[in-house]
Image (cartoon, rainbow, N blue to C red):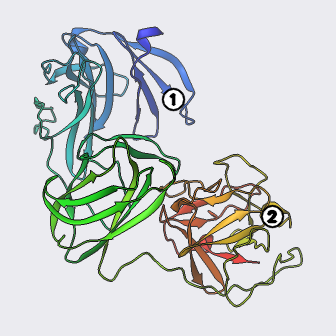
Amino acid sequence: MGWQGLDPTVFIDDDGQAYLYWGNNVCYWIKLNSDMVSYSGAINNIPLTKTAFGPDYEEAPWVYKRNGLWYMAYSSGLPECIAYATSNSPTGPWNFKSIIMPVITGNGGNHTGIIDYKGSSYFFYFKNGLPGGGDHRRSVCLEKFNYNTDGTIPTIPATSEGPPQIGNLNPFVKTEAETICWESGVETEKCSEGGVDVCNIENGDWIKVKGVDFGSNTTSFEARVASTNNSGNIEIRLDSSTGKLVGTCAVSNTGGLQTWVTKSCNISGATGVHDLYLKFTGGSGSFFNFNWWKFYESGTSIPTPTQITPTSTSSPDETPVITPTASITPITTPGSSYVKFRNSATGLYIDGMDSTSYGSNACQNISSNSEKQQWTIISSGDYVRFKNRATGLYLDGMGRTSNGSICGQWSNSGSDNQQWIQETMGNYVRLKNRATGLYLDGMGSTSNGSNLCQWGNSGSTNQQWQLQ
């Protein structure tokens, strides 16, 4: 389709039917099948009449439904403004209403998305107003707006401020370093521990995080960093890059810019709500990378694993690999002894599936007494790690924080994704991933080869494992 194949958007209607819209100087739509990658019926072409789209339809349709009316916002003209049309059906006919955002001076193009979130309506767009911006160097922007009483959209001006903050950030949970309101000098890159990290950090660079609620007694800070320099620091400041200094976290040489360690420091004087500035000092050139950070309050610290007392209740088709002792003693010599994990709900065992590919799924299977179901327990500070005997890979949360996300295997990274807290559940143990905060879950699936997933605390037998 060439240029006519640009800017696809998907809309799923109340009845579950999904539609795909797209096109430059033409507007196509099709019905998607339930697999969301194939379609049914013909490709339909919406006539670009003035009744439907006013002065001009250029590209980038955005379709949604509100109060029984279908809306299509789109880019109009060159340079582009944002206009919209409405319909009583997702397939039209469409009726032009008005321009939402006029042409922004200096902007050649502009695309949009419109959503409702927590009782308010938001308009997304882009512009090139940041230093170094240009026609194809644009930044995503956001404005809050209110529909008119008749459901029409008002004219929305582009601002430099954007919408007000709708809630304060909780600093006492692990927060990705790329959580940024504003920054000076830093960039991001793919991280060996999953996701991305903040990189190209040089002396004097900083990150701003807006509206952080430190409570009444914040006592410490930790950061996941990788460095090739012995003189780096993270200065924790309030309200500006030169504001009150409440702590300094020293970052020493870790052996490489993807060799990750967790550093910490004490915090004094951080109370209430402030803008947080993480200012980077010391070193020369790009002297360290930054993956995540977390604060702690008085009375809290990195959790200590609960010692467990596993019992073996083998059925005739199960032969325990080892005889459990009164409590688990971390095994520090790989290959010296192994355990198997049997799910209380499914009766299946955690299985490496003989896959040695990084990121391969850890699945469940019936008892085979094979090495792919045998795991070495290795001490990792206050946590434990699990290494598969057959694959040599470690059980890894993969940085996935969504319920139902798949748990995989990875080579030794030393990251929190491979660290697990052991929690006693009677004669069973639950395994909580340090990075994701989710529990290893059998998902109630009794099929051989079914995925091993992660889920928030459910208290169900799907999250209970018996050691044998």
In the drawing, what numbered circle is on residue 32? 1
Check disc 2 and report its element: helix, strand or loop. Answer: loop
| Residue type pointed to by label 1 | Leu
The span from disc 1 to disc 2 (Cα, nearest Å) is 38 Å
**Residue at 48% from the left image edge and 62% from the top image edge:** 435
Q: Quadrant of the C terminus?
A: bottom right
- The reply to whether residue 168 is in sight is no
Residue at figure coordinates x 47%, y 65% from the top left:
437
Residue 366 has which mark? 2
In the image, farthest residue toward the right:
316
Contact between labelled residues 2 and 1, with CB atoms less than 8 Å apart: no
Q: Position of residue 255 (x, y in %)?
A: 51, 53
The x, y position of residue 31, in whole percent, is 48, 26
Q: Position of residue 32 (x, y in %)?
A: 51, 29
Q: Residue 124 sits in which quadrant? A: top left
Mark 1: give few (<14), some (14-19) or many (20+) Cα within 10 Å.
Answer: some
Residue depicted at 73% across the width and 69% down the height: 376
In this rendering, the answer to whether 49 lies above or below 361 is: above
